[in-house]
Amino acid sequence: MGNSKHKDHFEGRLIMRYYFIVLLSSTIFCSTGFDVVQEDTVKIVEAGGDVNFTCIFPGHVPSTKAWFKQTTVGKYLQIVSLDLKKQLKWNSSFEKTNRFNVTKVDDYFNLTILKTKPSDSATYYCVVSAYETIGMGSATRLLVKDAAADRNTTLHQSLIETVDPGDSVNLQCSIFTESCAGDHSVYWFKQSSGHPEGVLYTKGERNGRCKNNTESQTQSCVYSLHKNNISRSDSGIYYCAVDQCGEILFGRGTQLNIREYFDFNPGLLALGISNIMFLALVVVLGIKLCRSQIKTSASQTTQDEDGLNYASITFRQKPLNTRRARAKFTQDQSLYAQVRSHQ
């Protein structure tokens, strides 16, 4: 059993070296090549979840495809390959788990891992070779969160950092461990609305500042991510993930906020004031015009009343036959004459 694992590992290293030699030679001697696209630079998954890796390439050229795994300690293992005859060849250690599957079409060769384990945390490469040309993807780093991680190790990040545009910032990640001292591989990645899977910033730095306490048998290390000339596009949550003794630990993340400033523009202020004054002038002129129209209408109405013509109407009266009637008519005429003289 042990000899079989050693043989698979040895064959994997030989195949990976072969691919790198072909890649180097194709870069030197061949002017043509093709791109191999791995869409995600980092994938984060809870232990027990499934994860899919994409590998996209030109489909019009017959080619050999392969997936490789680079472990946290730097070992390269070939997982599976597809030759020109469309035949799959699995590494026996991966095939027996029944957790690794591939989807093969003319222009992509995707790898799926089912029910992920912490030991699946690694860097995965897709390699495609055709004739004397070879293409390699930019790699996808898989980080598997383990709920049963070592409780004797503490990973600390400040929760919020607020900076001004154009400033520099140092995001720090501190690790305190009792059970596993030594070098750590530290990964920094950012999650934002535009990149829900995250963008990897560092690929396993080991240049932290560490101190050992011989009395308590503990070690504390501080790792930093330095960023210059901060802009709005840098806002987001920055996580550190530490690989210690084959185990991945995650920080809670630091929210990087960028202060918002509104630039004062005298030209815009002057334009705003002039618009307000123009609007006020339009309102005043409108009121004056309305009042002028009302006065003109009232004057016209008065002139029409003064120009009215009065006409007298004469009614034909019956002859006054009786003396009493003639006396009453004479009295009424006298009263009418008095009224007109008073007017």
Image (spheres, helix red, strand yellow):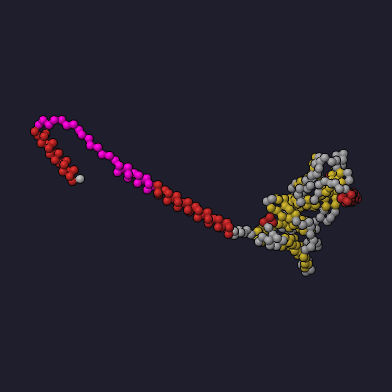
Given residues 293 and 166, the one toward you in this image is: 293
Write the start and end of the magenta stretch as one range.
294-322
Q: Which of the 4 image quadrants contains residue 81?
A: top right
Q: Is residue 337 magenta?
A: no
Question: Looking at the picture, does residue 63 appear above or below residue 160?
Answer: above
Q: Is residue 311 magenta?
A: yes
Q: Residue at x 80, y 52 (%)?
A: 123
Question: Looking at the picture, does residue 113 appear above or below residue 266?
Answer: above
Q: Residue at x 20, y 33 (%)?
A: 315
Q: In the figure, is residue 237 to the left or right of 89? A: left
Name of the residue lying farthest toward the bottom = 215
Given residues 85 and 25, the one toward you in this image is: 25
Q: In the figure, is residue 142 to the left or right of 341? A: right
Q: Position of residue 265 (x, y in %)?
A: 59, 59
Q: Position of residue 40 (x, y in %)?
A: 76, 49
Task: Let me know if residue 176 appears in the view.
Answer: no
Q: Position of residue 302 (x, y in %)?
A: 32, 45
